[in-house]
Image (cartoon, helix red, strand yellow):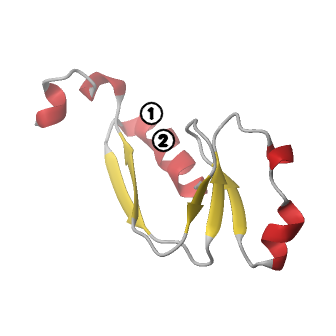
Amino acid sequence: MAIDYYFSEQMHKNDEPVIRFYGWDPFCLSLGRHQDIQAVDVKKLKLDGVDLVRRPTGGSAIFHSDELTYSIVIPKKLMHHTALYL
C-alpha cells in the first residue's frame, strides 16, 4: 500500500491519474485508515505468515488472499461526474 501513497503524492505534483492492479504474496490483512489495531491479534497473523498493512481509505479489515486488487488515484479536477467518463 506504500505504492498507493507514493502515487497519490505524485498525482498532486503532475495531475496524472493512475490505475494499478496487484496481488498479495504473502496473504495480508489490511486495516482501514481509522481502525484500531488493538482489535487484531498481530502475533497470530505472524504465526500464520499473514502480513498486516493499513489502507489510506476507511472501512473495516479486509483479508487479501488469492485475488486481484486495484487502486485508482484521480486528481480532484477530474472528479466532476461527466469528466469521469472520458
At 44% from the left and 33% from the top, the residue drawn is: 12
Location of residue 34 (image quadrant): top right
User: Mark 1 and mark 2: span between their CA atoms?
Assistant: 7 Å
- Asked whether, in this view, residue 29 is left or right of residue 23, the answer is right
Relative height, residue 13 to residue 53 (above, below): above
Q: Nearer the viewer, residue 1 or 77?
A: 1
Q: Secondary structure at mark 2?
A: helix
Measuring from the top left, give residue 77's x and y in whole percent: 29, 23
Measuring from the top left, give residue 58's x and y in whole percent: 58, 35
Relative height, residue 69 to residue 74 (above, below): below
What residue type is disc 2 on?
Ser
Does the residue at mark 1 contact the one at mark 2 (Cβ under 8 Å)? yes
What residue type is disc 1 on?
His
At 78% from the left and 69% from the top, the residue drawn is: 45
Relative height, residue 16 to residue 4 (above, below): above
The residue identified by callout 2 is 8
The residue identified by callout 1 is 12
- Asked whether, in this view, residue 14 is left or right of residue 7, the answer is left
